[in-house]
Image (cartoon, rainbow, N blue to C red):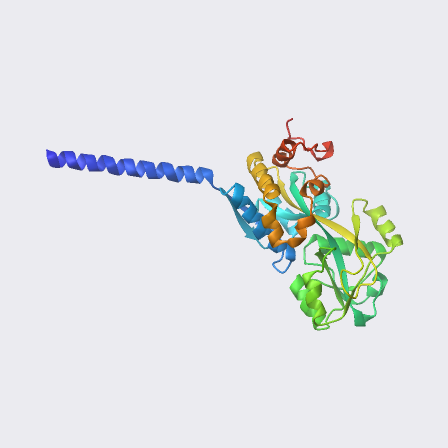
Amino acid sequence: MKKVLLISMLLSLSLLIIACSNESSGDSDEKDTYLSIGTTNTSSSLYAYYSGLSKSIEQQAPEIKLTIIETGATLDNITRLDNGQIDIGLGVMDGAYEAYEGMGEWEGKAQTKLRNLFTYTENALFYVVNLKSGVTEFQQLNGEKFNVGIRGSTTETQTNSIFNLLGIEPNVHSGDVADAVNAMKDGDIIGLTKVGVGSNPDATIMDLETAVDVRLLGYTEEEVAKIQEEYPWLRTTQIPMGVYDWQTAPITTIAMQVGNITTTELSEDIAYKITKAAFEEKKFQEESYQSLKDADFIDLTLQSSIPLHVGSIKYLEEQGIDVPDELIPEEYER
């Protein structure tokens, strides 16, 4: 009898332990949220930013687990978002605008579910050429081997569109940044196009300087007027004189705002937590991408070219920020 009682007690205890274990495991499954975030090529300085963003989220929302994925940047990320392959993606806002509106590459397939979590930087489009090429203006690129940006990126698409508009016809070289840098060092191409911080020396250009003498190409006032007449949503910026020792005049080029885009499929709660963590733990992002030290996330986000996610709006309004009507999507309930 005692043996039966002992066995019964042990069995009950075992069932209790299993039940508690299952309950604990269930809580963990409910608690943790696993997200994939599409970025860009690993050779891009923007790729490093995402390790900082991951650290920011870990500080305030450790239950959100980010998997950082190398992709072909904006256009690739938008396609992956549409296919449900990623949850968030790096997005150059000009490219996001065209996708949202169904323009250019997205004609007839507008991505109306696209939303912006927040915009974190405004970069410049660099057009770098070998000094020995003698090229000082864009028209002289005709027939020359020139890289127009990472294959499949907004930079590539945008550069091709602008060049077509201005009648510039280089011998196009496509590839990632590392491919273009090596080709330029080897003399296979005369120049490349890339995104970078306009106010600070760019790591890729500094790398190129170790092998070749370079110069930057800039748009004239007439070229800017023609570009903005066709593409009024495109902004311009100036790379100040003296950013590089050899730069003797400011350079006018295309400004590219970069944000983290998602879709209406991302829950309000998760979007809110990510935005809150990114804004309030900005220092970790600055450590990974130093140019963010002067970046105003709020100001940049309020310049978004597509509607914001409802979770982001919730956070901004909690901070007393008046979000413009054009950035508020139809699903947002005041």
Q: Between residue 99 and residue 228, name the one nearer to us.
A: 228
Residue at x-position 41% and y-position 37%? 27
Q: Quadrant of the C terminus?
A: top right
Q: In the rendered view, would you say 198 is above or below 26? A: below
Q: Quadrant of the N terminus?
A: top left
Total number of numbered discs in the rendering: 0
Residue at x-position 79% and y-position 61%? 242
Q: In the rendered view, would you say 151 is above or below 92? A: below
Q: In the rendered view, would you say 50 is above or below 3? A: below
Say left or right for 317 vs 144.
left
**Observer able to see residue 268:** yes
Residue at x-position 58% and y-position 37%? 272
- Residue 207 location in percent, x, y? 68, 67
**Observer able to see residue 72:** no
Q: Between residue 213 and residue 153, name the one nearer to us.
A: 213
Q: Between residue 90 and residue 98, name the one nearer to us.
A: 90
Say left or right for 169 vs 98.
right
Residue at x-position 65% and y-position 32%? 317
Outermost residue on the left side: it is 1
Q: Between residue 291 and residue 214, name the one nearer to us.
A: 291
Outermost residue on the right side: it is 222
Outermost residue on the top side: it is 334
- Residue 273 location in percent, x, y? 56, 38
- Residue 328 location in percent, x, y? 69, 33
- Residue 283 location in percent, x, y? 60, 48
